[in-house]
Image: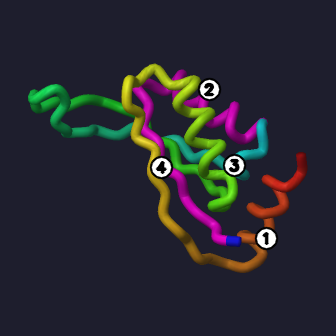
Amino acid sequence: MQHIIVYITAGNMDEARMLGKELVSRRLAACANIYPINSIYRWNDEMVEDNEVALMLKTTSERFEEIKETVVSLHSYELPCIISWEINGENKYLHWISDEIRKL
C-alpha cells in the first residue's frame, strides 16, 4: 500500500471545508489540511491571478480514483486541480492513515 498526498484547489474556504469534511467523513482521506493560497495560471488564453484555497489530503493510492470522482462531482470548477504524490513518513503515522481509511 502506497501512502499519498492529494492536492486539490478550491475557489473559497467554504468549498474547501465542504470537500475536506466530505472526503474525511467517507473515509477516503484520514486528514485534510486547508491553506489559503495565491495562484497564477493561464485559463482560456488569459493570465489569471487569484486567491484560492488548497487542500492536502493524507490517504493511500487505493482511494485516489474515488477521491477524484467525488471531488469532480462536488467541485464548482469546470476543471478542478486534483493531483497526488507518493509519501514516506513515520511508520506509526502512516499506519494511522491506513487505519482511518479502512474503517468503513
- Tag 1's secondary structure? helix
* Residue type highlighted by circle 1: His
- Tag 4's secondary structure? strand
> In this orientation, which residue lies closer to the viewer: 64 or 38?
64
Q: How far is mark 3 from mark 1, CA to CA?
A: 13 Å
Q: Indicate whether residue 54 is drawn in magenta.
A: no
Q: How far is mark 3 from mark 4, CA to CA?
A: 12 Å
Q: How far is mark 2 from mark 3, CA to CA?
A: 13 Å
Which residue was labeled with disc 1?
Answer: 95
> In this orientation, which residue lies closer to the viewer: 59 or 78?
78
61 over 83 or under it: above or below:
below
9 over 59 or under it: above or below:
above
- Range of residues picked out in magenta: 2-25
- Tag 2's secondary structure? helix
In the picture, residue 66 is in which quadrant? top right
Q: Which mark is residue 29?
A: 3
User: Does the residue at mark 2 contact the one at mark 4 (Cβ under 8 Å)?
Assistant: no
- Marks 1 and 2, the one that precedes in the sequence: 2
Q: Which mark is residue 8?
A: none
User: Does the residue at mark 1 contact the one at mark 2 (Cβ under 8 Å)?
Assistant: no
- Tag 3's secondary structure? loop
Which residue was labeled with disc 4?
Answer: 7
- Marks 3 and 4, the one that precedes in the sequence: 4
Q: How far is mark 2 from mark 4, CA to CA?
A: 15 Å
